[in-house]
């Protein structure tokens, strides 16, 4: 539960999406109403995901289909940081372990995506992965090409249970190549949201991160030094807290519980 009047002390909420706002193509019960209540109270709402299977506008469209109020500028995901990094390193030719939607988004952003003489390998969430695609990335890493990852999540929640994510691929790649990943983006890195906080004039002590994962969502809140709210609608259970080094400030059954305080 949240302390009485806590909502009054928070100006902005950063919400994880998978397992917090929705599962698959369905909003989690009560999430839409809670978000509406927060907006009506004048709270700013942002949506933060480590899922790199789609382009930013796809998440915007997905939330709109669920009748959740959102602006494109309120959606934050790791490819912003990845693309900024690639440009800072003068890298415009990459190999990708990722979906066709992400490949097209990178091409639209000016990058060449190819297994032919790339400057870097990018490991992203890929629910279209084939053995040949994975083997091609590993071959390039054997040949000396460095690799980065878009995020560290081990699993992604789905209506059918947890499914493999990037964090499961990384040990496999390192075991096959003997080479560790050069850099991992996404939550829980503080820069995932600090740029938006600076842009919109948000103060950490009046900001909350809401999510279902201890080692990404709650760890991000710790890194930023803002309020952390764990919801139990995704991958984390109360039992997981007993062995976790990362502890949330507050625990809710779901985002729906915010509606009572926001009303």
Image (tube, rainbow, N blue to C red):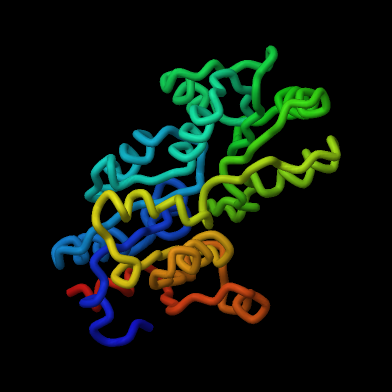
Residue 113 location (% of width, % of height): 57, 18
Q: Residue furthest top?
A: 116
Q: Quadrant of the N terminus?
A: bottom left
In percent of width and height, residue 247 lies at 54, 76
Is 48 drawn above or below residue 6 in the view shown? above
Q: Is 243 placed left or right of 104 in the picture?
A: right
How many marks the image carries: the answer is: 0
Residue 69, percent across and down? Answer: 22, 49
Furthest residue in direction bottom, as rendered: 4
**Residue, x 15% and y 67% (percent of image)?**
41
Give above or below for 5 relative to 263: below
217 lies left or right of 164: left
Residue at image x 41%, y 76%? Answer: 252
Residue name at image x 45 percent, y 50 percent: 192
Residue located at (42% from left, 56% from top): 16
> Looking at the picture, how far across and down is residue 167, in whole percent?
67, 49
Q: 78 or 183: which is nearer to us? A: 183
Q: Is residue 2 left or right of residue 125?
A: left
């Amino acid at each position: 539960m949240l302390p009485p009047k806590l909502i009054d002390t928070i100006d902005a909420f950063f919400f994880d999406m998978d397992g917090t706002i929705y599962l698959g193509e369905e909003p989690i019960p009560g999430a839409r109403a809670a978000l509406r209540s927060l907006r009506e109270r004048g709270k700013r709402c942002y949506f933060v995901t480590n899922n790199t299977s789609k382009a930013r506008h796809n998440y915007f469209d997905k939330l709109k289909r669920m009748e959740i109020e959102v602006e494109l500028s309120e959606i934050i995901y790791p490819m912003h940081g990845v693309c900024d990094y690639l440009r800072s390193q003068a890298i415009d030719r990459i190999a990708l372990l990722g979906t066709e939607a992400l490949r097209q988004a990178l091409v639209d952003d000016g990058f060449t995506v190819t297994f032919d003489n790339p400057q870097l390998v990018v490991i992203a969430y890929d629910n279209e992965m084939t053995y040949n695609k994975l083997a091609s990335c590993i071959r390039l890493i054997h040949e000396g090409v460095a690799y980065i990852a878009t995020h560290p999540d081990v699993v992604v929640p789905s209506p059918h249970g947890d499914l493999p994510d990037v964090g499961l691929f990384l040990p496999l790649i390192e075991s096959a190549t003997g080479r560790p990943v050069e850099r991992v983006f996404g939550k829980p890195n503080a820069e995932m949201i600090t740029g938006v906080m600076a842009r919109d004039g948000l103060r950490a002590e009046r900001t909350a991160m809401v999510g279902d994962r201890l080692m990404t969502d709650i760890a991000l809140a710790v890194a930023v030094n803002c309020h952390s709210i764990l919801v139990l609608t995704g991958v984390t259970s109360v039992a997981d807290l007993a062995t976790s080094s990362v502890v949330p400030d507050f625990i809710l059954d779901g985002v729906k519980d915010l509606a009572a305080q926001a009303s």
